Amino acid sequence: MVEQPNTDTDVVVTRLMRNLRLLTGCDALLTAMEGGALVAEVMALTARSAETVADDARTMLLTLRQDPRKSGGDHT
């Protein structure tokens, strides 16, 4: 059974971890591929995914700074 996130921060962390796994997969795929148009498309997907990961990380940090009680601890 998968544990469900119970706070806004948990949701963001879950999304971050999913996106990081995606980036890891893209990196492995790019490493295994030869050049070409498909590699360029995968690189563009990786760049967009990296932007999403960075945005989610910023959201998580702002959430923790604004209300540390939501995450269940002091994260200052």
Image (tube, helix red, strand yellow):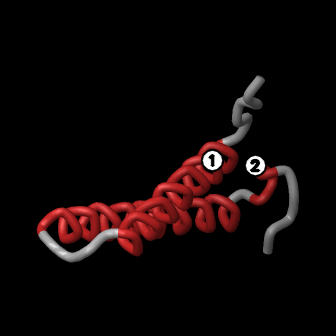
Look at label 1 and name its amino acid. Answer: Thr
Nearer-the-camera pick, 35 or 63: 35
**Residue appearing at x 62%, y 59% in the figure:** 63
| Residue for badge 2 | 70
Neighbours of disc 1 within 10 Å: few (<14), some (14-19), many (20+): some
Q: Looking at the picture, does residue 18 appear above or below residue 66?
A: above
**x and y percentages locating residue 16 in the rendered image:** 57, 56
**x and y percentages locating residue 21 in the rendered image:** 55, 56
Disc number at residue 75?
none
Q: As drawn, which residue projects farthest toward the top?
A: 1
Split into 4 quadrants, where in the image is the C terminus?
bottom right
Q: Looking at the picture, does residue 53 appear above or below residue 2?
A: below
Q: Are marks 2 and 1 in contact (CB under 8 Å)?
A: no
**Residue appearing at x 71%, y 57% in the figure:** 67
Mark-to-mark CA distance, 2 and 1: 15 Å
- Asked which secondary structure carries label 1, the reply is helix
Q: Looking at the picture, does residue 35 appear above or below residue 11?
A: below
The first of marks 2 and 1 along the sequence is 1
Question: Which of pointers 2 and 1 indicates the residue nearer the eye?
Answer: 1
Nearer-the-camera pick, 54 or 22: 22
| Residue for badge 1 | 14
Look at label 2 and name its amino acid. Answer: Lys
Q: Looking at the picture, does residue 7 appear above or below residue 49?
A: above
Does 41 sit left or right of 22 as displayed?
left
- Asked which secondary structure carries label 2, the reply is helix
